[in-house]
Image (cartoon, rainbow, N blue to C red):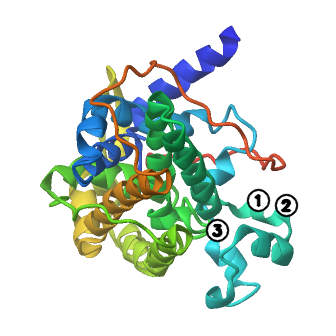
Amino acid sequence: MKWRWMICLFLVLMAEQSRAWGFYAHQQINQLAVYALPQELFPFYRSQIDYLGKHAVDPDMRRYLVDGEACRHYIDIDVFEKAIPLDTLPRRYSDAMAKFGEDSLLANGIVPWHIQWVLQKLTKAFQENNWEKVIHISAELGHYVADAHVPLHNTANYNGQLTGQHGIHGFFESRLPELFMPRYDLITPEAVYLEKPLEYIWDRIEQGFSALDTVFSSELDMRRTWVESKKTSLEERNGKLVKVWSLEYAAAWHKKLNGMVERRLHASIEGVACFWYTAWVLGGQPNLPGSVVVAEQVSELPKEPLKTDKPGRKEDHGPE
């Protein structure tokens, strides 16, 4: 097993280097979601806020180690839209599998359905009063809910590889939050119970998907008109100089996006808190302890009874 942990360490270092919703953003989303919880949950989750932030990235660390993990982070809506209109796309997994087949779903992503399955696991942990498991699963559920809010997790052109925009994935979900997130107003309303959580996450996915035209067109226009030397710069990361999108170029695109990144982050935080709260309600609204000792480990949820998907996408977080 030693080699697996060596790979885990390598992935952690790579994630820290790329600030791979990127590494920094996932941590912030989980931690800020704690402050949107009602009083019944807040003290318990607040006592575990460091763990929830640190382990928000566990699913990303598993992407290249665990069969079937990669497809849990996205859904290529545009692939399905080529077959049928978006408003007729089956929302339930069983209906979608009957329409497209399991192989097609796994190849093009299952994030809305995986969120539903993880919600069920969290609900069960609440029912069993298994507080350590509640925190483990909450950290992971937060990751998948946040991923579903990123527009570039909703398209086969996830890294601009089909439009000559290599690196746009990390530019949007890592570089922009890293630079501008401290300026955002990310205070969210108190979490509410989701009567139809699957419909809720589908609505959020559709919002992200509808924003893709703006994401691609605004950056492509800049990419064609800016001189190469102005697009990137060198920054020191972990003692090394690495090539990153320049502050000037990032600020210009951020302005063109007109608040989109802030809105998607705000919605992510709100969504994570609502899913945690919904699991607690469905789990019988148990009284929570003030705190719990949670083992420091890279948690790994049991795999669903699904065939393995194709090798994980390489989401390059830096400019070409």
- Quadrant of res 102: bottom right
Seen in the image, is 301 located left or right of residue 48? right
Q: Which mark is residue 103?
A: 2
Name the kind of residue labelled 1 in the image. Ala
Q: Which residue is mark 3?
A: 76
Image location (x, y in percent) of residue 264: 34, 66
Dots 1, 2 in contact, CB < 8 A: yes
Q: Residues within 10 Å of mark 3 (few under 14, many from 20)?
A: many
Name the kind of residue labelled 3 in the image. Asp
Q: Residues within 10 Å of mark 1 (few under 14, many from 20)?
A: some
Image location (x, y in percent) of residue 161: 60, 62
Dots 3, 2 in contact, CB < 8 A: no
Q: Which residue is mark 1?
A: 107
- Residue shown at the point (63%, 86%) measured from the top left: 86
Image location (x, y in percent) of residue 79: 70, 75
Name the kind of residue labelled 2 in the image. Asp
Residue 143 visible in the displayed image: yes
Tag 3 secondary structure: loop
Pick whichever, 157 or 140, lies toward us.
140
Pick whichever, 247 or 284, lies toward us.
284
